[in-house]
Image (tube, helix red, strand yellow):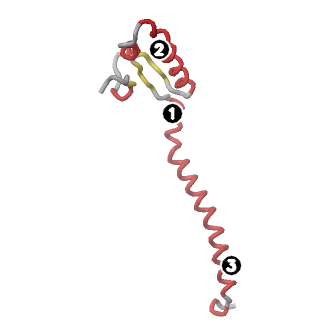
């Protein structure tokens, strides 16, 4: 049957079928493209965990001696949670050199 002789519902159902085929293909293509683009990042994180450097001495600066034990316990608990999430947490006193953005700044620094 020539296209000019088809009824409007037949043309409409063809458009719906085309949309029903294109939409899943576009979603699958977008997902696969995003997966392909982020694969190197996932591999880098798996082989080289993110690193944070904490200056424990600076974090404890200004804390009264009675509260130091609790502050250290809080620091250890935070470091443990970060480590459980895949982050390597180091004390600044053990680091010879590192980029500035690897350091966790205390709240008193500008």
Residue receiving disc 2: 71
Q: Is residue 27 above or below residue 16?
A: above
**At x 61% / y 65%, what residue is drawn?**
23
N-term-proximal mark, 2 vs 1:
1
Q: How many marks?
A: 3
**Which numbered dot is residue 21?**
none
Asked if marks 2 and 1 touch (Cβ < 8 Å), the reply is no
Residue 95 figure quarter? top left
Residue linked to disc 3: 13
> In the depicted view, which residue is nearer to us: 3 or 63?
63
Q: Which residue is mark 1?
A: 45
Check contact, mark 3 vs mark 2: CB within 8 A.
Answer: no
| Residue drawn 29% across the image and 27% down it | 110
Say whether disc 3 or disc 2 marks the residue closer to the N-terminus.
3
State the SS at label 3: helix
Q: Earlier in the sequence, mark 3 or mark 1?
A: 3
- Is residue 107 found left or right of 15 in the rendered image? left
Residue at the spot x=41%, y=15% of the render?
A: 56
**Residue at mark 3 to residue at mark 1: CA–CA distance:** 48 Å
Residue 107: name its quadrant.
top left
Instruction: For the residues labelled 3 and 1, say whether their Cβ atoms are less than 8 Å apart.
Output: no
Mark 2 Cα-neighbour bin, 10 Å: few <14, some 14–19, many ≥20: some
Of all residues shown, which one is farthest toward the bottom?
5
Quarter of the picture containing the N terminus is bottom right
Distance CA(mark 2)–CA(mark 1): 30 Å
Residue 93 in the image, given as x and y percentages of width and height: 38, 12
Q: Marks 3 and 2: which is nearer the front? A: 2
Task: Give the foreground label among 2 and 1.
Answer: 2
Of 4 and 101, nearer the camera is: 101
Residue located at (48% from left, 17% from top): 75
Near mark 3 (Cα within 10 A), the count class, few <14, some 14-19 or many ≥20, is: few
Q: Is residue 65 above or below residue 13?
A: above
């Amino acid at each position: 049957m020539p296209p000019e002789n088809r009824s409007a519902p037949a043309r409409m159902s063809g458009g719906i079928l085309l949309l029903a085929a294109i939409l899943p293909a576009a979603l699958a293509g977008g997902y696969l493209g995003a997966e392909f683009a982020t694969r190197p990042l996932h591999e880098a994180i798996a082989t080289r965990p993110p690193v944070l450097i904490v200056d424990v001495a600076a974090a404890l600066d200004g804390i009264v001696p009675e509260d130091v034990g609790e502050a250290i316990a809080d620091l250890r608990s935070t470091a443990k949670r970060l480590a459980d999430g895949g982050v390597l947490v180091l004390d600044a006193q053990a680091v010879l050199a590192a980029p500035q953005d690897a350091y966790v700044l205390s709240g008193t620094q500008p």
